[in-house]
Amino acid sequence: MSNAEIRGRFVWHELMTTDTDAASDFYSQVVPWKAEDSGMPSYSLWMSGKYRAGGLMALPEDASATPPHWIIYIGTPDVDGTVAAAEKLGGKVLKSASDIPNVGRFAVLSDPQGAAFAVFTPAEGSGDGVPPGGAIGDFTWHELATTDPGAAFDFYARLFGWTKGAAHDMGEMGVYQLVSHGGQDVGGIYKARDNSTPPSWLSYVRVADTAKAANAAKSAGGRILNGPMEVPGGSWIVMMLDPQGGAFAVVEPPKGAKGSAGASDDGSEDSPPAKRAARKAAKKAPAKSPPAKSAPAKVAAAGKSAAKKAGKAVKKAAKVVKKAAKKVVKKAAKKAAKKSVSKPAAKRAVAKKTAAKPKAKAKAKAKGKARSKK
């Protein structure tokens, strides 16, 4: 692959943490990776089979205020030109462009909203380091949670030539904008629900079984943020933190997914969880409304929130109906009781009146006889 073709591709993922040994032990239990020495000082490689899945290094001592995190590397044929363009577009340089002998040239930037990412140009003859497809152990989806999705997309689109895929309305959670590269959906951008959380990228690693990955993560000291959760399309996802605090996610493809690249019904690289949730919501939406989209975390949150509100509404309605029914029953019973009491009284009155008639006749007859004797 030429450097021109690498523009806009997610080519590398790197974990910067406070304890590389602990991180190596943790990830090797959760995903099918092994940490190997890179031949460079204080830097290890994550190996997924015979392919390099990413890198591992300790946070610099002068970055003690920075929490452990994963950083994505996006390909470019010209690191210096991309850095200059990023600055003009409002981005910031966190680490100036520099060379890694026999590997390539890179720089670390932040977009105008504050999400960190790196740009990378492979050294000639080194290869791009990207696995051939979305196999188990590969990163297959990338999501950006930010404060201004529209501005963020424009920034990345101008730098890397990304195009807009479908835009899915997630209701209260806003719009989830799919990102396409080379005609294929590769990620998504959406508005973070909590503005106090800094904008950031979240990457998904493909695994064979998310339930096993979640259990392994918990046993190894990780923290589950969401899942395992099935999403529309049949995939399962889990979002988690490693013991040092680095955030990442795993995705299990639908049963029977075709090919090692995890072909999906929409032709995307690995039928993304948030995208499939959007398609399901879209089917339920009015014809004129834009199709809905959820992201795995927020869908669930949005779904749970909606379910909770609906549950409360149903309970409230049930109470009203129950109360009204009681009133109706009570009123009917009272009316029936009143009728049942009045009927015997009426009957007694009629009976009394009927019985009084013969007595009156007998009395009148006796009185008439007495007069005739006189």
Image: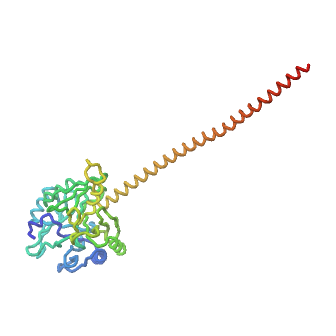
The front one of 150 and 324 is 324
> Does 208 sit left or right of 101 as displayed?
right
Residue 201: percent from left, percent from top: 24, 63
The residue drawn where x is 29% and y is 54% is 283
Residue 133: percent from left, percent from top: 18, 71
**Is 85 rendered above or below residue 352?**
below
The residue drawn where x is 58% and y is 43% is 330
Q: Is residue 208 visible?
A: yes
> Does 305 sit left or right of 99 as displayed?
right
Task: Say how many tags the image has.
Answer: 0
> Does 356 sit left or right of 50 as displayed?
right
The residue drawn where x is 22% and y is 67% is 263
> Where does the C terminus fall, quadrant-wise?
top right
Q: Quadrant of residue 207?
A: bottom left
The front one of 30 and 19 is 30
Its colouring scheme is rainbow
Residue 174: percent from left, percent from top: 28, 53
The front one of 354 and 113 is 354
Q: Quadrant of residue 37?
A: bottom left
The residue drawn where x is 33% and y is 64% is 230
Residue lying furthest right in this view?
A: 374
Q: Is residue 19 visible?
A: no
Residue 123: percent from left, percent from top: 10, 73
**Is 290 rendered above or below residue 120?**
above
**Is 55 rendered above or below residue 300?**
below
> Where does the N terminus fall, quadrant-wise?
bottom left
**Is 105 rendered above or below residue 183?**
below
